[in-house]
Amino acid sequence: MKTPFGLTLLSASAVIHASAWKDQCAGFKMQSVDNLQNVTTSYYSAGTLVNLTSLYTPLSTSSLPAFCRVQFNVVTNPATGKTAQAELWLPDGWNQRIIGYGNGGWSGGLPYSAMGPDGVAQGYASYGTDTGHQSSSRNGSWGLGNDDAIIDHAYRALHLTTVASKALTMEYYGNSGVIKSYYSGCSTGGRQGLKAMTMFPEDYDGVVIGSPANSFGRLMPWELHQSLVMQPVNSTRWIPPTTWTAIHEEVLKQCDGVDGVVDGILSDPEACNFVPESMTCKQGNNGTNCLTLDQLETFRKLYTTYVDSEQNYIFSPYALGGELGYGSGLSTATPFPIAEDYYKYFVLNDTKWDWRTIDASTIALGMKVNPGNMDIKWYKDVLAYTAAKSDLDVDNHFKLFTVPGMQHCRVRFALALGSGVDTAHAHRKFCYRADLGHGFLVPMGSVHKHLLYKKGRSMMVCLTSSMKKGYFVERLFRDFQSKLRWSNGLNKDEA
Ligand SMILES: *[C@@H]1O[C@H](CO)[C@@H](O)[C@H](O)[C@H]1NC(C)=O
Ligand SMILES: *[C@@H]1O[C@H](CO)[C@@H](O)[C@H](O)[C@H]1NC(C)=O
Ligand SMILES: *[C@@H]1O[C@H](CO)[C@@H](O)[C@H](O)[C@H]1NC(C)=O
Ligand SMILES: *[C@@H]1O[C@H](CO)[C@@H](O)[C@H](O)[C@H]1NC(C)=O
Ligand SMILES: *[C@@H]1O[C@H](CO)[C@@H](O)[C@H](O)[C@H]1NC(C)=O
Ligand SMILES: *[C@@H]1O[C@H](CO)[C@@H](O)[C@H](O)[C@H]1NC(C)=O
């Protein structure tokens, strides 16, 4: 029989085998976990249509191998009856590993597009949660007065889903041995991963953390600050999207070759001494390929460390080289909605709040409230850990690598690290598969000895991804291997 892949797969014995899995799925008892409600299972044969809606990442595909879909609600607060929606997908061809996927923004929906094409397709038992509420990633109104949901979103729903999914996976496959447990997430998903490592280090053997949106107390005001600097659109401060492209070209013109390779990528933005004045508009020219004096001032502010009116450090600035993403990312005509909602619905509880009024006291309040205890002090935790182990050679245990050409979770040369959103790009799996032979980013499933964290456990923290089969990564290692940049400089307190 021909499958949609054009392969002859189903011999007589394979048919029996598949039907046995179908029966296993239908009869799955789920006796190993007791805080579940409304459990249902459904079996998807290889190559059948999987067409699922989600407020986070929906999925419509006919390319998955056979799996058992388990849907359940996990009770996150027995006292209030609060639940979170979750799913665990169990492939017939299991690889003895389990992976959880994170969410994005304020979402609010299941990460189907990662669970299917990324997880199940590679043989992982794959799970995710809506983090305890339904919403799009850009809408945080659900947080208003909803502490149970805020705590679920901050860490609780993912942790309880992880514990339940690990037990259910063992039960389903009748496996009593040790399985490897992983996590992958980007943006909010990255923050969820850092939070899990800090609070529940036994949950995972390795984590892929892409562009973590950690420290909302600092990140959110910075995002509004970037808008305040250049809005409104009709002001002379405004830098339109087309001008961002011109700025990027000028950055490359001045600095692309600094790393020794002219390839459209800055390996080290901090090594670029960019002179924006070279783009100053000639008299009478206000075109999009140059910067007026007011726009030059905007540029300088966006690329300068953000301190509040009392000179407290808040956040690091834009990095050179990312210009193609800025005009459609944060530097748009409207304030970034995730940041606006943070103050409206989680910090101030004032639905009428005007984002332009943000000041040092608003920022301080956000840090104090720290909704759901979602932020972690990653750098301080690592510092405390290493300080307590005076015999530890820090450089052998913690490394920071930055990714040339990468923007927030995706874009251009390093795509969708940890998010699995860009299903069109196979190289998103880089962190799982590439064996670079350097001992850092080895494939998932290997034991990672280079990054130790809490209780002496081995952890892989993969903050990087690249696409051209090791080329950029080779360069990356050469440039950054011995530079633990975050241990110096202004942003060390909150890295
Ligand atoms: C479970 O299903 C019942 C009936 O379908 C529904 O009333 C209840 O709200 C559901 N529970 C959860 C936690 O979703
Ligand atoms: C997938 O489901 C949506 C609605 O849930 C429907 O509009 C769409 O036609 C379905 N796609 C396929 C290929 O059946
Ligand atoms: C956010 O979600 C709420 C509740 O579903 C809805 O009423 C509101 O219109 C949404 N806001 C935006 C900007 O979409
Ligand atoms: C910009 O537009 C707003 C209305 O959207 C108007 O009130 C304001 O005067 C305009 N400013 C300039 C400099 O044109
Ligand atoms: C650019 O100049 C033209 C004519 O000199 C003028 O009409 C237009 O408003 C100017 N645009 C900006 C953004 O200053
Ligand atoms: C807003 O509500 C949250 C709980 O949802 C609370 O932690 C916070 O302190 C409140 N903010 C103010 C200004 O009362």
Image (spheres, rainbow, N blue to C red):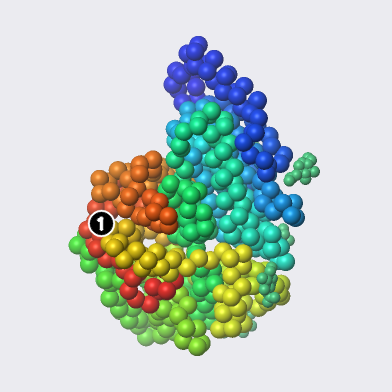
Instruction: Write the residue at 45% across / 22% down.
Output: 6
Q: Is residue 450 above or below residue 281?
A: above
Q: Position of residue 161 (x, y in %)?
A: 59, 46
- The quadrant in which the C terminus is found is bottom left
Residue 271 higher or lower than 479, as above or below: below
**Apparent side of residue 64 relative to residue 473 in the rendered image (left or right):** right
Of residues 117 and 477, the one drawn nearer to the viewer in this rendering: 477
Mark 1 highlights which residue?
477
The answer to whether residue 72 is left or right of residue 493 is: right
**Relative horizontal placement of residue 292, taking residue 91 as reference (left or right):** left
Q: Position of residue 433 (x, y in %)?
A: 36, 41
Where is residue 149 shown, x and y percent of the image?
67, 58
Residue located at (50% from left, 32% from top):
176
Helix, strand or loop under label 1: helix
Q: Quadrant of residue 251?
A: bottom left
- The picture places residue 353, in percent across and down from the top left corner, at 68, 77
Residue nearer the viewer, 365 or 398: 398
Kindly identify the amino acid type of the residue bearing the numbered disc 1.
Phe
Count of numbered labels shown in the rendering: 1
